[in-house]
Image: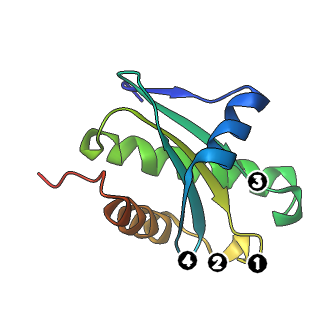
Amino acid sequence: MKKTEMLKKNYEFRKVLSKGKYYSGKYIEIFALKNKELKNKLGIAVSVKAGKAVHRNHLKRLIRENYRLLENNLEIGNSIVFLWKKKMDIKTANFKDIKNDMENIFEKMGIFIND
C-alpha cells in the first residue's frame, strides 16, 4: 500500500460514511469520498454479526490484499471504506470473488484505470 493510508479514527470513518457515495457489489459495499490529498485513504469494517474474530480478520486480510493488488490502477485522492455485507456467508467468500467484486465496483465508480 504505497499510495494509501489507513483510516483509523472514528470521525474519519463517520465522515466517509455520511458524506460519501455508496456503491454495492455482491459481497462488499463501498463508500467513497474525494479528498484533497495526494494519497488514497482506506478503511475496512466487518460487522460482529458476520462471524467470530478469526473469520472477520480473514475477510479483512482478503480485502486488504485485493486492494493492494489493484491500488496501482486507481485514481489518487479518494477516501474509501469497505463494508462486508452481513447477509453474505463468510465461508463462501474467496479471494477471486472479492477481487472481481472490487474491480466491478471501481469501474462503476469511475476510478479504475485500465492499463
Residue at image position (40%, 21%) is 37
What residue is pinned by disc 3?
56
Q: Mark 2 points at which residue?
A: 92
Disc 3 or 1, which lies upstream in sequence? Answer: 3
Upstream in sequence: badge 3 or badge 2:
3
Q: Which amino acid does label 4 sit on?
A: Lys
Name the residue located 31 percent from the left edge and 63 percent from the top edge: 107
Left or right: residue 1 compared with residue 46: left
Q: On the image, which quarter does residue 11 sit in?
A: top right
Q: Residue at x 61, y 39 (%)?
A: 43
The amino acid marked with disc number 1 is Lys
Q: Which of 76 and 58 is in front in this view?
A: 76
Q: Could you tell me how far apart the alpha carbons at marks 3 and 2 are, in whole angstroms?
A: 13 Å
* Rendered image quadrant of residue 77: top left
Q: What residue type is labelled 2?
A: Thr
User: Alpha carbon of mark 3 to alpha carbon of mark 1: how far?
Assistant: 14 Å
113 shown above or below 27 = above
* Disc 1: CA contacts within 10 A as few (<14), some (14-19) or many (>=20): few
- Report how far apart the C-alphas of labels 3 and 4 lie in the structure: 17 Å
- Tag of residue 26: 4
Circle nearer the viewer, 3 or 1: 1
Mark 1 or mark 4: which comes first in sequence?
4
